[in-house]
Image (spheres, helix red, strand yellow):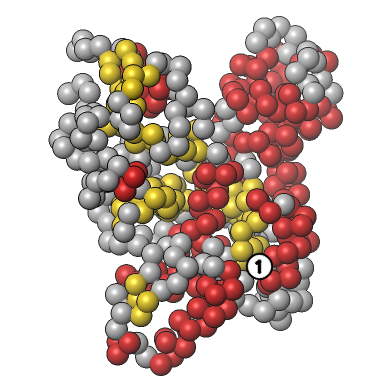
Amino acid sequence: MFGVINMPPPEKLVGLIGKTNVGKSTLFAAITLAPVEIANHPFTTIKPNMGVGYVRRRCVHVELGLPKCDPRTGMCINGYRFIPVKIMDVAGLIPGAHKGRGLGNKFMDDLRQADALIHVVDASGSTDLEGNPVSPGTSDPLEEAKLIQFEVDEWYKNVILRIWENRISRHIYTVKEPIEYLTQNLSGLSIKKHHVIKALKDTGLNDKPLKNWRREDVESLALSLRRISKPILIAANKIDLGPAEENVKRLKEFFGEKYVVPVSGLAEYILRKAALNKYVEYLPGDPDFKILDADKLTSKQKHVLEIIREKVLRKYGSTGVQELINRAVFDILDLIVVYPVEDHRKYTDHYGNILPDAYLVPRGTTARELAYMIHTDLGKTFLYAINAKTGERIGEDHVLNDNDVIKIVAAKAHR
Ligand SMILES: Nc1nc2c(ncn2[C@@H]2O[C@H](COP(=O)(O)OP(=O)(O)O)[C@@H](O)[C@H]2O)c(=O)[nH]1
Ligand SMILES: [Mg+2]
C-alpha cells in the first residue's frame, strides 16, 4: 500500500584494501561479526567477499525519551543504534599491480564499486612489502601506505585514460554538456555528477573545452576523481604489537589526523566472539569489557583478554574498529542519520514499529530527496514534511539535520 515505508535505505559500500598479511581478513571478520545474532539481512545483493558492518550512534529514541525502538535492520543495544553498511574485502594488492602483477583486474573490479576505501596497513611493521612476515619494527608502514596509495592512483589513472581513449574522446568536438557527458561515461566507477563537478573545479579544468584537453589534463582529472570518489581512510592495524605507536604518529603526521585510525582487528575479533559466547559483556566501540563468568574461561583465555585490556583498550581507549567504521561513514563519506516515520507523534511506521528505519544519507539531503529515497511515489507526490521532534512543517528544499525524525506528507497516489 502507498505510504508504507518499504524501500531499503540507500546502500554505501566500504572496501578494505591493502597488501597481504596486514590483517584485512581478520578485520573484515571482526567488522562483519554482528554483536548479536540477527536474522534480517538489509541489503539486496551480497557477494562472497561482502559483508555487513555497522556504524554505532546514540539512538534518537533515547533523546525522545522512549523506552525502546524497533529497528527493521541492524539493532539497538543499550541505547546505541547499530546501522548497517556494506563492507567488502577487496582482493589483495601488491606493489606493481597496476603494471599487471598480482590480482590486478579482480582488484579493479572490486574497487570501482566502492564509495570509500579503508587502507589497512601493518602499523607494527611486521610484514614486508610482499606480505612476508618479518620481525616487528623491521618494515616501514609509512612507505607501505604511500606505495599502496600510489598503486591505487596509478590504477585509477590508467582506467580513466582507457575510458577517455575508447569512449570519451570520440565525441569531444560535439558534446554540449561536458559534465553530464563525463558523468555518464564514468558512472561505471561509481562516479557521480557531484564528484565530476568538484574534480573539474579542483583541477581548474571547468573552463577548458574537452576538445582542448591534453593527456596531462585527463590524468589530473583522474587523480582528483580518485581522491573525491574513492576517499581513503587508513587503518593502522596491529596496535597491540610493540613498535606500532611510533608508526601511528608518523602516519598521522603524513596523512593527517582525520585519515588515520589506530586499530587492532584481532583484539576486536576476539572480544566480539567472547561477547557472542557470553564470556564477556562487550559492545563494539566500548572502552572496556566485563568478564561475565570467569569459571568458563581457561587461564590462557583470561591472559589474552588481559593483554587486550592492557595493550589496546587502556592505551588507545578502544580497539579502534568501531571508530574506523564510524569515521569512514560520518567523516570521510560525510553521511548523516535520518529516521523516517509515518506517525510523527508516535514515531512509528504503519504497523506501530518505533523508529524502524535509520537512513544514512549525504549531508545536504533535502526533505524531498529523502522522500524519493523512501519511495519514488512519495517523492513525486510530495506535499511537505514534518519534523517530528518539533512538529514543524518543512518544505521540499529544507536541508535535513543529523538525527532528524521526519514524516513525509504526500498527495494520494493513483494506482
Ligand atoms: N598481533 C596482531 N596480529 C594480527 C592482527 N590482525 C591480524 N593479525 C594477524 O596477521 C596475520 C594476517 O592476517 P590476515 O587477516 O589473514 O591478513 P590479510 O592477508 O591481510 O587478509 C594473521 O596471522 C593474523 O592473526 C592484529 O590486530 N594484531
Ligand atoms: Mg586475506
Query: Residue drawn at (31%, 39%), measured in percent from left and top?
Result: 357
Disc 1 beta carbon < 8 A from ligand 1?
yes
Q: Position of residue 267 (x, y in %)?
A: 50, 73
Query: Residue drawn at (45%, 17%), measured in percent from left and top?
Result: 397
Q: Depth check: 100 or 68 in front?
A: 68
Left or right side of 339 for 270? right
Residue 54 in the image: above or below residue 133: above
Mark 1 — residue?
122
Residue 228: quarter of image:
top right
Residue 361: quarter of image:
top left
**Residue 253 appears in the rendering:** yes
Residue 286 in the image: above or below residue 220: below
Query: Residue drawn at (55%, 48%), measured in percent from left and top?
Result: 328
Left or right side of 20 for 146? right
Q: Position of residue 372 (x, y in %)?
A: 37, 22
Q: Position of residue 319 (x, y in %)?
A: 52, 67
Left or right side of 214 for 363? left
For label 1, the SS is: strand
Name which residue type carries label 1: Asp
Query: Residue drawn at (48%, 58%), measured in percent from left and top?
Result: 322
Q: Position of residue 117 (x, y in %)?
A: 59, 48
Q: Residue furthest left?
A: 351
Quadrant of the frame with the N terminus: top left
Quadrant of the frame with the C terminus: top left
